[in-house]
Image (cartoon, helix red, strand yellow):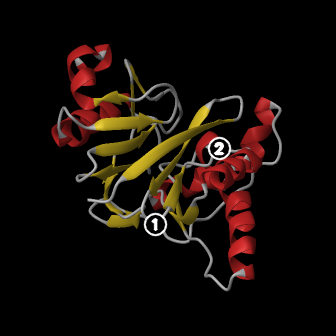
Amino acid sequence: MPECKIALVPVTVFQQNCSLIWDTATMNAAVIDPGGEPGKILDGIARLGLKVEVILLTHGHLDHAGGAKALKGELDAARAAENLPPIPILGPDIRDQFLLDGIEEAQKQFGMSGMRNVTPDRYLTEGETVQAAGLTFDVLHVPGHTPGHLVFFSPVARVAFSGDTVFKGSVGRTDFPYGDGALLIEGIKEKLLPLGDDVTFIPGHGPASTLGAERGDNPFLQQ
C-alpha cells in the first residue's frame, strides 16, 4: 500500500475543506472539492511539492466546485510548459450539472465573485473506481443533499471523502427544493456505515471523524 498523506485547505467564507491527498513516494496528488480561492490551493500544492494528476468533485454546490475551473486552468498551463497532458475534472454524477451550471449566478447571493461554472471532463456513477494518489477509490452515489452527490472511498487506506453527506455529529442540509432528508439518511446508513467503523471520513466542513463514532453518537443516525 502506498503511504499517503492528506492536507486540508479551508477555502472561502464557507470554510469548505478542500482536500489534498498524495502518495509520499511519488508526490502524485489529487485535489478534492476545490470550492474557491484557487490561489490559496495552488500555494498549498506548491508548498508541499505536489504533482496534481486529477481533480475530484463530490457534488455541484458552489462552495465545493466554484474554484475547479480556475484551478484546472492554472495547473494545465504549468503542465503544458512541461509537455504534460491536461488534468481531468472527474465527478460528480451528471444529476448535479444544473448546480455546476449555476455557480456564477449563485455566488451573487453571498456577495462573492470569481467562482466559475464548470463541466467535468467525465461524470462518475456508482460502481466506478478512480485512481488518485496511488490509491483506488470506489465511487458511491449518496444523494439527498444534492441529487448527484458522490462519496470517494479507499478500501485500502480506510478513508472516505464524504462531501456534505455526513459530518461529525451532523449530516448535510436537505432544505433545498431538490433535497431529500430521508434519502440522505438512508444512503448514509446503507452505503457509508457498512464500510466499517474504522473508516475515517473527511467531510466538506468541520473536523474529520470515523464512521464508528457517528454510528454511536450522531443524533441524526440514531433512529
> In 3D space, how far apart are the residues under numbered discs 1 and 2 (Cα atoms)?
31 Å
Q: Earlier in the sequence, mark 1 or mark 2?
A: 1
Q: Residue at x 63, y 40 (%)?
A: 63
Q: Identify the disc placed on residue 202.
A: none
Specify few, some or many for label 1: CA neighbours under 10 Å numbering under 14, 14-19, or 20 or more: some
Residues 104 and 58: in front is 58
Specify few, some or many for label 2: CA neighbours under 10 Å numbering under 14, 14-19, or 20 or more: many
Q: Residue at x 27, y 39 (%)?
A: 187
State the image coordinates of residue 43 (x, y, percent, origin top left): 71, 49
The relative height of residue 87 versus residue 70 in the rendered view (above or below) is below
Q: Amino acid at mark 1?
A: Thr
- Left or right: residue 34 compared with residue 58: right
Q: Nearer the viewer, mark 1 or mark 2?
A: 1
State the image coordinates of residue 65 (x, y, percent, origin top left): 61, 50
The relative height of residue 110 versus residue 80 in the rendered view (above or below) is above
Q: Residue at x 23, y 43 (%)?
A: 191
Q: Identify the disc placed on residue 62.
A: 2
State the image coordinates of residue 95 (x, y, percent, origin top left): 47, 56
Work out which quarter of the rendered image holds the N terminus and state it: bottom left
- Residue labelled with disc 1: 26
The answer to whether residue 56 is visible is: no
